[in-house]
Image (cartoon, rainbow, N blue to C red):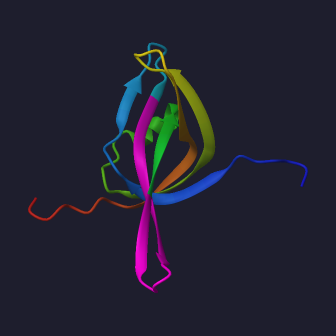
Amino acid sequence: MNHLKNKVTLMGRLGNAPEVTTFDSGKKLVRFSLATNERYKDKNGEWQEEVQWHAVNIWGKMADRAENLDKGQEMLLEGKIAYQSYENAKGEKKYSTVIEVSDFLILHKAVAEVGQ
């Protein structure tokens, strides 16, 4: 193996409607959370479900496709893990992990909530 890769593939559901930011340069950023889940049997043989939340960033022309996604839509995405740091209002250094998307595919539209 002569090339080390930072590549991730996730299949999940949007946890919120996308947040769109357009910069002065015209470049666009779409952010949202993606929920993935894993089912497993615990030591007592009972099924458990564990949900993981992933922060997702989509940039540029792909952001145009992503800005109209809806909460609950199921999607498949590919990208890389990126680590970011920033300083909060108190001057404390904070860190976050995001998925920088290189491609995505919508698998299913969001399911309407009961009563709507």
Quarter the N terminus occupies: bottom right
Front residue (pair 48, 112): 48
On screen, residue 100 versus residue 88, left or right, reads right
Relative to 60, 50 lies left or right? left
Compared to 78, does 24 lie above or below? above
Q: Position of residue 95 (x, y in %)?
A: 54, 31
Instruction: Name which residue lies at 37% across and 39% down.
Output: 67
Asked if residue 11 is positioned above or below residue 85 in the image, the reply reads below
Residue projecting furthest to the left: 115
Q: Measuring 41% from the left and 74% from the top, which residue is drawn there?
A: 48
Name which residue lies at 32% across and 46% down.
16
Image quadrant in which the C terminus is located? bottom left
Q: Is 76 on the left or on the right of 113, as rendered?
A: right
Q: Position of residue 45 (x, y in %)?
A: 46, 86
Per the rendered image, the range of residues in magenta is 29-51
Residue 11, percent from left and from top? 50, 60
Q: Name the residue rendered at 49%, 23% in the picture.
A: 27
- The foreground one among 85 and 67 is 85
